[in-house]
Amino acid sequence: MTTEQLVQQIRKKQSFLCIGLDTDLEKIPPHLLNSDDPIFEFNKSIIDATHHLCVAYKPNTAFYEAYGIKGWKALKKTITYLNKNYPEIFTIADAKRGDIGNTSTRYAKAFFEDLHFDSVTVAPYMGKDSVEPFLSFNDKHTILLALTSNEGAFDYQTKKTENKELYKQVLQTAMTYTNAENLMFVVGATKAEYLTEIRKIVPDNFLLVPGVGAQGGSLEEVCKYGMNKDVGLLINSSRGIIYASQEKNFDKEAAKKAKELQLQMKSALIAM
Ligand SMILES: O=C(O)c1cc(=O)[nH]c(=O)n1[C@@H]1O[C@H](COP(=O)(O)O)[C@@H](O)[C@H]1O
Protein backbone atom coordinates (compact mmCIF):
# COMPACT_ATOMS: atom_id res chain seq x y z
CA MET A 1 0.00 0.00 0.00
CA THR A 2 1.26 3.49 -0.79
CA THR A 3 1.38 6.27 1.78
CA GLU A 4 -1.12 8.22 -0.36
CA GLN A 5 -3.61 5.34 -0.12
CA LEU A 6 -3.17 5.30 3.66
CA VAL A 7 -3.79 9.07 3.88
CA GLN A 8 -6.91 8.74 1.69
CA GLN A 9 -8.26 6.05 4.00
CA ILE A 10 -7.61 8.22 7.06
CA ARG A 11 -9.54 11.12 5.51
CA LYS A 12 -12.41 8.86 4.43
CA LYS A 13 -12.84 7.08 7.77
CA GLN A 14 -11.92 10.13 9.87
CA SER A 15 -9.69 7.84 11.83
CA PHE A 16 -5.99 7.12 12.27
CA LEU A 17 -6.59 4.27 14.68
CA CYS A 18 -4.50 1.11 14.59
CA ILE A 19 -5.89 -1.84 16.54
CA GLY A 20 -3.32 -4.15 18.06
CA LEU A 21 -4.15 -7.83 17.69
CA ASP A 22 -2.15 -9.02 20.71
CA THR A 23 -4.24 -12.12 21.10
CA ASP A 24 -3.69 -14.05 24.31
CA LEU A 25 -5.59 -17.31 24.98
CA GLU A 26 -5.70 -16.44 28.68
CA LYS A 27 -7.59 -13.22 27.98
CA ILE A 28 -10.00 -14.03 25.17
CA PRO A 29 -13.63 -14.96 25.99
CA PRO A 30 -13.67 -18.56 27.33
CA HIS A 31 -16.45 -19.69 24.98
CA LEU A 32 -14.05 -19.32 22.01
CA LEU A 33 -11.60 -21.84 23.45
CA ASN A 34 -13.80 -24.71 22.16
CA SER A 35 -13.32 -23.72 18.51
CA ASP A 36 -10.63 -25.26 16.24
CA ASP A 37 -8.64 -22.04 16.04
CA PRO A 38 -9.57 -19.72 18.93
CA ILE A 39 -6.90 -17.14 18.05
CA PHE A 40 -8.18 -16.70 14.51
CA GLU A 41 -11.86 -16.79 15.57
CA PHE A 42 -11.18 -14.02 18.08
CA ASN A 43 -9.25 -11.90 15.54
CA LYS A 44 -11.91 -12.39 12.86
CA SER A 45 -14.69 -11.24 15.20
CA ILE A 46 -12.69 -8.19 16.33
CA ILE A 47 -11.81 -7.28 12.71
CA ASP A 48 -15.39 -7.68 11.43
CA ALA A 49 -16.71 -5.50 14.28
CA THR A 50 -14.09 -2.71 14.06
CA HIS A 51 -12.72 -2.44 10.50
CA HIS A 52 -14.83 0.66 9.70
CA LEU A 53 -13.41 2.50 12.73
CA CYS A 54 -9.70 1.96 12.13
CA VAL A 55 -7.20 2.17 9.27
CA ALA A 56 -4.66 -0.41 10.44
CA TYR A 57 -4.23 -3.64 12.41
CA LYS A 58 -1.02 -4.58 14.15
CA PRO A 59 -0.61 -8.18 15.27
CA ASN A 60 2.43 -8.41 17.53
CA THR A 61 4.10 -11.64 16.41
CA ALA A 62 5.16 -12.56 19.99
CA PHE A 63 1.54 -13.42 20.78
CA TYR A 64 1.52 -15.91 17.88
CA GLU A 65 5.06 -17.27 18.15
CA ALA A 66 4.29 -18.14 21.79
CA TYR A 67 1.93 -20.88 20.52
CA GLY A 68 4.38 -22.40 18.02
CA ILE A 69 3.09 -23.69 14.67
CA LYS A 70 -0.53 -23.23 15.79
CA GLY A 71 0.13 -19.56 16.51
CA TRP A 72 1.98 -18.92 13.25
CA LYS A 73 -0.89 -20.55 11.29
CA ALA A 74 -3.37 -18.28 13.10
CA LEU A 75 -1.23 -15.26 12.15
CA LYS A 76 -1.19 -16.34 8.51
CA LYS A 77 -4.95 -16.89 8.49
CA THR A 78 -5.48 -13.46 10.08
CA ILE A 79 -3.38 -11.54 7.53
CA THR A 80 -4.92 -13.53 4.66
CA TYR A 81 -8.41 -12.74 5.98
CA LEU A 82 -7.55 -9.04 6.24
CA ASN A 83 -6.02 -8.81 2.76
CA LYS A 84 -8.93 -10.66 1.16
CA ASN A 85 -11.84 -8.98 2.93
CA TYR A 86 -10.50 -5.54 3.83
CA PRO A 87 -7.74 -4.74 1.31
CA GLU A 88 -7.93 -1.02 2.15
CA ILE A 89 -6.56 -1.72 5.66
CA PHE A 90 -2.87 -1.06 6.37
CA THR A 91 -1.25 -4.06 8.05
CA ILE A 92 1.70 -4.01 10.44
CA ALA A 93 3.70 -7.06 11.50
CA ASP A 94 5.03 -5.98 14.87
CA ALA A 95 8.07 -8.24 14.93
CA LYS A 96 10.89 -5.80 15.81
CA ARG A 97 13.41 -7.57 13.55
CA GLY A 98 16.84 -6.49 12.24
CA ASP A 99 20.08 -8.44 11.72
CA ILE A 100 23.08 -8.53 9.37
CA GLY A 101 21.96 -7.67 5.83
CA ASN A 102 21.84 -11.24 4.55
CA THR A 103 19.54 -12.24 7.41
CA SER A 104 17.41 -9.07 7.32
CA THR A 105 16.62 -9.89 3.68
CA ARG A 106 15.08 -13.18 4.81
CA TYR A 107 13.05 -11.44 7.52
CA ALA A 108 11.81 -8.94 4.92
CA LYS A 109 10.80 -11.77 2.57
CA ALA A 110 8.98 -13.55 5.41
CA PHE A 111 6.80 -10.55 6.27
CA PHE A 112 6.42 -8.86 2.87
CA GLU A 113 6.42 -11.77 0.39
CA ASP A 114 5.17 -14.78 2.34
CA LEU A 115 2.74 -13.13 4.75
CA HIS A 116 1.97 -10.06 2.58
CA PHE A 117 2.07 -7.47 5.36
CA ASP A 118 2.31 -3.81 4.30
CA SER A 119 4.90 -3.05 6.97
CA VAL A 120 7.11 -4.47 9.69
CA THR A 121 8.63 -2.98 12.84
CA VAL A 122 12.44 -3.03 12.87
CA ALA A 123 15.03 -2.29 15.57
CA PRO A 124 17.68 0.25 14.42
CA TYR A 125 20.54 -0.98 16.62
CA MET A 126 22.50 -2.89 13.94
CA GLY A 127 22.48 0.08 11.56
CA LYS A 128 22.25 0.78 7.84
CA ASP A 129 22.91 -2.67 6.36
CA SER A 130 20.40 -4.24 8.76
CA VAL A 131 17.59 -1.82 7.80
CA GLU A 132 18.09 -1.24 4.05
CA PRO A 133 17.04 -4.79 3.00
CA PHE A 134 13.55 -3.97 4.37
CA LEU A 135 13.49 -0.61 2.55
CA SER A 136 14.18 -2.13 -0.86
CA PHE A 137 10.59 -3.43 -1.26
CA ASN A 138 8.24 -1.22 -3.28
CA ASP A 139 5.17 0.11 -1.47
CA LYS A 140 6.19 -1.65 1.74
CA HIS A 141 7.03 0.28 4.91
CA THR A 142 9.71 -0.18 7.52
CA ILE A 143 8.71 1.12 10.94
CA LEU A 144 11.89 1.86 12.86
CA LEU A 145 11.93 2.08 16.66
CA ALA A 146 12.89 5.65 17.57
CA LEU A 147 11.59 6.48 21.05
CA THR A 148 9.66 3.61 22.60
CA SER A 149 6.83 3.78 25.14
CA ASN A 150 8.43 1.75 27.94
CA GLU A 151 10.51 2.90 30.95
CA GLY A 152 13.61 1.20 29.54
CA ALA A 153 13.57 3.75 26.70
CA PHE A 154 15.46 6.05 29.09
CA ASP A 155 18.33 3.52 29.43
CA TYR A 156 19.74 4.34 25.98
CA GLN A 157 17.35 6.19 23.67
CA THR A 158 17.40 9.54 25.48
CA LYS A 159 21.13 9.37 26.36
CA LYS A 160 23.39 11.81 24.50
CA THR A 161 25.95 10.60 22.00
CA GLU A 162 28.03 13.38 20.38
CA ASN A 163 25.83 15.91 22.18
CA LYS A 164 22.67 14.50 20.68
CA GLU A 165 20.17 12.06 22.14
CA LEU A 166 20.39 8.60 20.61
CA TYR A 167 16.79 8.64 19.35
CA LYS A 168 17.55 11.85 17.40
CA GLN A 169 20.66 10.22 15.95
CA VAL A 170 18.53 7.24 14.88
CA LEU A 171 16.01 9.51 13.13
CA GLN A 172 18.66 11.61 11.36
CA THR A 173 20.85 8.71 10.25
CA ALA A 174 17.93 6.58 9.08
CA MET A 175 16.75 9.41 6.83
CA THR A 176 20.06 9.09 4.89
CA TYR A 177 19.41 5.41 4.05
CA THR A 178 18.51 4.36 0.50
CA ASN A 179 14.69 4.42 0.02
CA ALA A 180 14.22 6.39 3.27
CA GLU A 181 10.82 7.46 1.90
CA ASN A 182 9.64 3.98 2.95
CA LEU A 183 10.41 4.70 6.61
CA MET A 184 7.96 5.26 9.43
CA PHE A 185 9.03 5.60 13.07
CA VAL A 186 7.74 4.29 16.39
CA VAL A 187 7.27 6.93 19.08
CA GLY A 188 5.48 5.92 22.29
CA ALA A 189 2.36 7.88 23.25
CA THR A 190 3.83 8.08 26.76
CA LYS A 191 6.58 10.31 25.29
CA ALA A 192 4.27 12.86 23.61
CA GLU A 193 6.31 15.82 24.90
CA TYR A 194 9.21 14.72 22.68
CA LEU A 195 7.12 14.92 19.50
CA THR A 196 7.86 18.59 18.77
CA GLU A 197 11.59 17.82 18.59
CA ILE A 198 10.92 14.64 16.59
CA ARG A 199 8.82 16.52 14.03
CA LYS A 200 11.74 18.96 13.48
CA ILE A 201 13.82 15.99 12.24
CA VAL A 202 11.12 13.96 10.44
CA PRO A 203 8.37 16.42 9.46
CA ASP A 204 6.85 14.20 6.76
CA ASN A 205 7.16 10.59 7.90
CA PHE A 206 4.32 8.65 9.47
CA LEU A 207 4.73 7.83 13.16
CA LEU A 208 3.32 4.68 14.72
CA VAL A 209 2.32 5.68 18.23
CA PRO A 210 1.54 2.84 20.66
CA GLY A 211 0.78 3.40 24.33
CA VAL A 212 -2.68 4.95 24.54
CA GLY A 213 -5.14 2.91 26.61
CA ALA A 214 -3.43 0.33 28.83
CA GLN A 215 -0.11 2.28 29.04
CA GLY A 216 -1.81 5.60 29.80
CA GLY A 217 -0.58 7.81 26.91
CA SER A 218 -2.72 10.82 25.92
CA LEU A 219 -4.26 10.85 22.45
CA GLU A 220 -4.87 14.59 22.69
CA GLU A 221 -1.20 15.36 23.46
CA VAL A 222 0.01 13.08 20.66
CA CYS A 223 -2.25 14.86 18.15
CA LYS A 224 -1.23 18.30 19.42
CA TYR A 225 2.51 17.73 18.99
CA GLY A 226 2.71 14.94 16.41
CA MET A 227 0.29 15.70 13.58
CA ASN A 228 1.62 16.90 10.24
CA LYS A 229 -0.11 18.12 7.07
CA ASP A 230 -1.00 14.53 6.07
CA VAL A 231 -2.02 13.64 9.64
CA GLY A 232 1.14 11.50 9.81
CA LEU A 233 0.01 9.42 12.78
CA LEU A 234 -1.14 5.88 13.38
CA ILE A 235 -2.19 5.59 16.99
CA ASN A 236 -2.29 2.05 18.34
CA SER A 237 -4.29 0.57 21.15
CA SER A 238 -4.27 -3.19 21.78
CA ARG A 239 -5.51 -4.36 25.20
CA GLY A 240 -7.65 -1.25 25.72
CA ILE A 241 -9.81 -2.30 22.74
CA ILE A 242 -9.64 -6.04 22.21
CA TYR A 243 -10.17 -7.04 25.85
CA ALA A 244 -13.07 -4.69 26.55
CA SER A 245 -15.18 -7.70 27.54
CA GLN A 246 -14.92 -11.46 28.00
CA GLU A 247 -18.61 -12.01 27.33
CA LYS A 248 -20.27 -13.29 24.12
CA ASN A 249 -20.67 -9.69 22.87
CA PHE A 250 -16.92 -8.97 23.26
CA ASP A 251 -16.69 -7.80 19.63
CA LYS A 252 -19.39 -5.16 20.12
CA GLU A 253 -17.76 -3.96 23.33
CA ALA A 254 -14.41 -3.72 21.50
CA ALA A 255 -16.13 -1.70 18.76
CA LYS A 256 -17.45 0.71 21.43
CA LYS A 257 -13.91 1.33 22.71
CA ALA A 258 -12.64 1.78 19.14
CA LYS A 259 -15.48 4.19 18.42
CA GLU A 260 -14.55 6.34 21.46
CA LEU A 261 -11.02 6.74 20.07
CA GLN A 262 -12.26 7.28 16.51
CA LEU A 263 -14.53 10.11 17.67
CA GLN A 264 -11.60 11.81 19.42
CA MET A 265 -9.59 11.42 16.21
CA LYS A 266 -12.41 12.90 14.15
CA SER A 267 -12.40 15.98 16.41
CA ALA A 268 -8.63 16.29 16.04
CA LEU A 269 -8.95 16.10 12.25
CA ILE A 270 -11.65 18.78 12.20
CA ALA A 271 -9.44 21.04 14.34
CA MET A 272 -6.41 20.54 12.01
O1 LIG B 1 6.38 -1.35 18.21
C1 LIG B 1 5.37 -1.31 18.93
O2 LIG B 1 4.26 -1.45 18.47
C2 LIG B 1 5.54 -0.90 20.33
C3 LIG B 1 6.54 0.02 20.59
C4 LIG B 1 6.55 0.69 21.82
O3 LIG B 1 7.34 1.59 22.05
N1 LIG B 1 5.63 0.35 22.75
C5 LIG B 1 4.67 -0.62 22.54
O4 LIG B 1 3.82 -0.82 23.43
N2 LIG B 1 4.66 -1.30 21.35
C6 LIG B 1 3.69 -2.39 21.11
O5 LIG B 1 2.38 -1.82 21.02
C7 LIG B 1 1.41 -2.67 21.67
C8 LIG B 1 0.82 -1.92 22.84
O6 LIG B 1 -0.20 -2.65 23.44
P1 LIG B 1 -1.20 -2.05 24.54
O7 LIG B 1 -0.36 -1.47 25.62
O8 LIG B 1 -1.97 -3.26 24.98
O9 LIG B 1 -2.07 -1.03 23.84
C9 LIG B 1 2.19 -3.95 22.05
O10 LIG B 1 2.09 -4.86 20.97
C10 LIG B 1 3.61 -3.48 22.20
O11 LIG B 1 4.54 -4.50 21.95
Image (cartoon, rainbow, N blue to C red):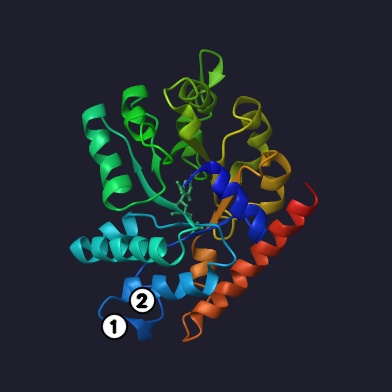
Looking at the image, which is closer to me, 179 or 153?
Answer: 179
Crowding around mark 2 (Cα neighbors within 10 Å: few <14, some 14 to 19, many 20+) is some
Q: Tell me which residue sits at (33%, 46%) in the image.
A: 112
Residue 3 sits above or below residue 155 on the image: below
Residue 93 sits above or below residue 248 on the image: above
| Residue located beneath label 2 in the image | 41
Q: Tell me which residue sits at (33%, 71%) in the image.
A: 39
Q: In this view, does 46 lie to the left or right of 78?
A: right
Looking at the image, which is closer to me, 243 or 259?
Answer: 259
The percent coordinates of residue 226 (x first, y second) are: 66, 40
Q: Distance between the residues labelled 2 and 1?
A: 8 Å
Q: Is residue 209 left or right of residue 86?
A: right
Crowding around mark 1 (Cα neighbors within 10 Å: few <14, some 14 to 19, many 20+) is few
Residue 128 sits above or below residue 75 on the image: above
Kindly state the secondary structure of the residue where label 2 is placed.
helix
Residue 55: which quarter of the image? Answer: bottom right
Residue 128: which quarter of the image? Answer: top left
The percent coordinates of residue 144 (x first, y second) are: 45, 36
Kindly state the secondary structure of the residue where label 1 is placed.
loop
Residue 27 visible in image: no
The percent coordinates of residue 97 (x first, y second) are: 32, 40
| Residue located beneath label 1 in the image | 35
Looking at the image, which is closer to me, 220 or 208?
Answer: 208
